[in-house]
Amino acid sequence: MGRYLLGRVLHSILALWVAVTATFLAIHRLPGDPFGGAQLDPDTRRRLIQMYGLGLPLWRQYTAYLSSLMHGRLGWSLVSVDQSVGAVVAQALPVSLTIGALALLWAVPVGVGLGLMAAHRRGGVVDRLTLGIGVLGLGVPSFVVAVLLDYLVGVRLRWLPVAGWGTPADGVLPALALGLTPCAAIARLVRTQALEALGSEYVGAARARGLSPAFILVRHVLRNALLPTVTAIGPLAANVLIGSFVIESIFAVPGLGRVFVQSVLDRDYPLVTGITVVYAALVLACNLVADILAAAVDPRIRLAGGSGA
Amino acid sequence: MPRPYGHAAPILSVLLGATLVAGCGTGRPEPAAAPSGSAILHLVLAGDPPTLNPMLAQDALAFDVLNQTMEGLTREDASGDAQPGIASSWQTSDGGLTWTFHLRSARWNNGDPVQASDFVYAWRQALDPRTGSPYQGELRYLAGAKAVLQLPAPPNQTKAPQAYQSYLQSEGPKIDALLNAVGVSAPDAHTLVVHLAQPTPYWLGLTSLPVYYPEDQHALAAWAAGKYGTDAPYTLSDGPFSVSTWTHGASLDLRANPDYWDAAHVHLAGVHFEIVSDTNTVENLYDTKAIDALIPTVPHGTESQYQAEPGFQTAPELSVDGVLFNAHNPLLADVHIRRALSEAIDRTSLVQGVVKANAAPASVLIPPSVVYAQGKSIGGLVPPELPTSANATQARNDWKQGLADLHLSTAPALSLVIPNAGGAPDEAAAIQSMWQQTLGIQVNIQAVDPNTWVHQLVSGQFQQCIFWSWNADYDDPETFLDIFRSSDPENFGHWNDAAFDAAMSQAAAASDLQTRGKDLAAAEEELLKQVPIAPLWFPVRNWIAQPNVQGIEILPTGPDYDLKNVSIQG
């Protein structure tokens, strides 16, 4: 298990380096500069480019960036005066995590419940509802759902604020929009696993023993269906983080996703690469946890990992 | 300055179009407003202001907040004129070379008096190459300023610390000497004397810009270097409002500044800015009355929807949109080719059918709201106008002539670079079809993100044609003409015309405004004949406020609006 873990960690570090390098090259490859778009006279623009060291060869900028990264420094924003990338992340990441947690908080239990009920009454109302949510959650991009939700609930019905951040009501619509995809994914997963379990011999045996359907569903079916769900939550949590890019812009939530989108448009190079590092680390951490969980649950994985290394 | 496209980051508008959420009405009764003096105005900012340090500010986000919290010698009004601000009066002497400003007894919101030396200190700071002020070029009119502006910029402090240190040692004394020689001085606490390098009729209008604001050097000395303007506690105010809270990326609150010299005429208790980048969301916020106004403009494409609603207004904008030609390109170096491309565009139908938004077809370069020579009419010396409807026959003849000049039988495909924001894609498509129909040429539209578009424009790297949009830096024809001088760094199309340059030099040397106006008109006439740019339309600002909100002033140059006189009725 130790060797397996070490391998996964090294693999994550390699993936992180690839992500940072690719982002660094891509954002510097984009034409433009961080100095206020159209509004500068060319002389001043040249002076600022020199002052911020952006006139140096790219490989020198890259090595300087990597070395400061290895010292744990994410650098300073080129657009927001006196804002370190670390400070921006420290301010925006908790907001994104709050929205993400709220989304998973409803999506996981609702998804599990729906999946279980759908399997229990296959072809029934709940099953068809689950199918509908699946189409909506997995087939329609979350930003489309977000715009529709915002228009219906915020503008038409005026039940909830259309945008903003500060009151608990502000979190409802973004969390709803963001949670739909994981909810649909979990419902589907649980339904498949539950159907498999329902057809198994041990459930048949339980039925033969005269146990109540509710007891069988919770005790035998749910238990079996939950294991793959737990391991799927890692990638789903990563998915929620990435989904927040556009959702945050729509609902004016001051989270990291919105900052990231803006930083790309602004060509705020240190912020773009810095947020990439944070995102990549989070996604890799989610996957690592999922891998470890899977290994803990299924001895075949850790044995294969241990003997292979 | 070039007018920025899409600084509101309309990613979603691009992805979705405005169709999904268009057409929502306002159906709720007006909320009962608080009595005057306790009302908060709710607005949206498209992003977090990068800084509120006036010297480092360079975008509308910072300018629009600073114009409410700060005041320079003068304050710009809705018609673009300079009104007394911290200076209660002024006079000029030496034929416009010397300006003497008399300051009123104003105070900073920390209680310090606003003194003439605060202006001297601030202007020197802004010119100092070690500051890195993006707007320092606006101070070039001061005597001795050009010498400072030509100094080399310092190397990067963190990436090249040793080079930076040696720069400070070698250049520092020189910089200080040159800064001390700049033509601004404070004979006493309430008198500021400014010497200009040459008489400049429009210079007074610049003194309301953030880069000309004063600075409270005593307050700044108490803060760590670089902190000024980065957070609410590190802001200062000598204007109608001050920053009370600033949650980066989320919201910014202003409250009325009791220390402001004209506080008796400020009716609002404060302003709440919510930071919202998505334009559809901004629209939803207004429709649900969560915000009080859509300023300086309603989101692109919603003009016709809001036009019928109470509180809708238009304000002049000192800008012009058009297509800029790269004169270094062999095809476009030919004047007949450029002229044909301009003539083939039916400006009236382009504006009525595509641009809309109350814009006016452009038959000249300079917007009609800019007056030659500062309000003094120069009778009959308006340059000949371009026809606003297409002249197909003329265009084809010019095109043939141009191809013959170049010994070409058919023209190669033409490229047009545009920002993929706002209405640009639709406008480009209309121009593309006009060129194809009239001249039979193939036009390739290259839609790039706004930052890339700016890069292609200002680096002059666009190959042939590019969308061009120019916003006046000051209310004078020169701001539109200067950038076509062959030596001007902002002559992005590389056009080089001796007659035009001569007319501009004459205007600069003119001894009276009448002559200057004639010279500028002659320059514009030459430009319209040679077509380095095809001016297409004059945009206006379409804005709306809830009917109970009064007194918003939309400004034609510099910051977008002034909220000093706003009141909210019950």
Image (cartoon, rainbow, N blue to C red):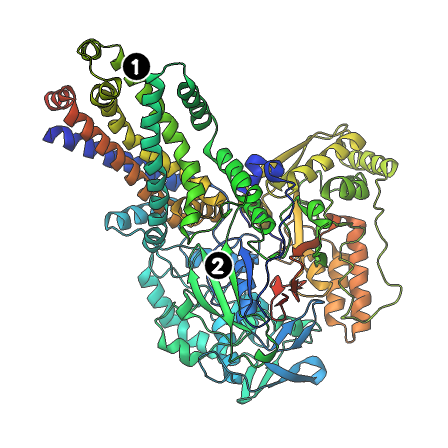
Q: Amino acid at mark 2?
A: Pro
Q: Is residue A120 visible?
A: yes
Which element type, helix, strand or loop, lies under badge 2? loop
Does residue B446 appear to the left or right of A110 in the view shown?
Answer: right
| Nearer the observer, A154 or B528 | A154
Dots 1 and 2 on the same chain: no
User: Numbered disc 1: what chain?
Assistant: A
Q: Residue at x 74, y 56 (%)?
A: B498
Alpha carbons under labels 1 and 2: distance apart: 54 Å
Q: Position of residue B521 (x, y in %)?
A: 81, 62
Q: Amino acid at mark 1?
A: Leu
Which element type, helix, strand or loop, lies under badge 1? helix
Residue highlighted by disc 2: B49
Q: Position of residue B199 (x, y in %)?
A: 69, 76
Q: Residue at x 88, y 35 (%)?
A: B393
| Nearer the observer, A135 or B59 | A135
| Nearest to viewer (mark 1 / mark 2) | 1
The image's mark for residue B38 is none
Does residue A233 appear to the left or right of B238 in the view shown?
Answer: left
Q: Residue at x 57, y 40 (%)?
A: B13
Q: Determine which quarter of the picture holds residue A39.
A: bottom right
Give the crowd class for mark 2: few <14, some 14-19, many >=20 residues within 10 Å. Answer: many
Q: Residue at x 33, y 49 (%)?
A: A94
| Nearer the observer, B420 or A29 | B420
| Nearer the observer, B238 or B18 | B18
Does residue B77 appear to the left or right of A226 in the view shown?
Answer: right
Q: Quadrant of the N terminus of chain A?
A: top left
Residue highlighted by disc 1: A195
User: Numbered disc 2: what chain?
Assistant: B
Q: Quadrant of the C terminus of chain A?
A: top left
Does residue B372 appear to the left or right of A5 in the view shown?
Answer: right
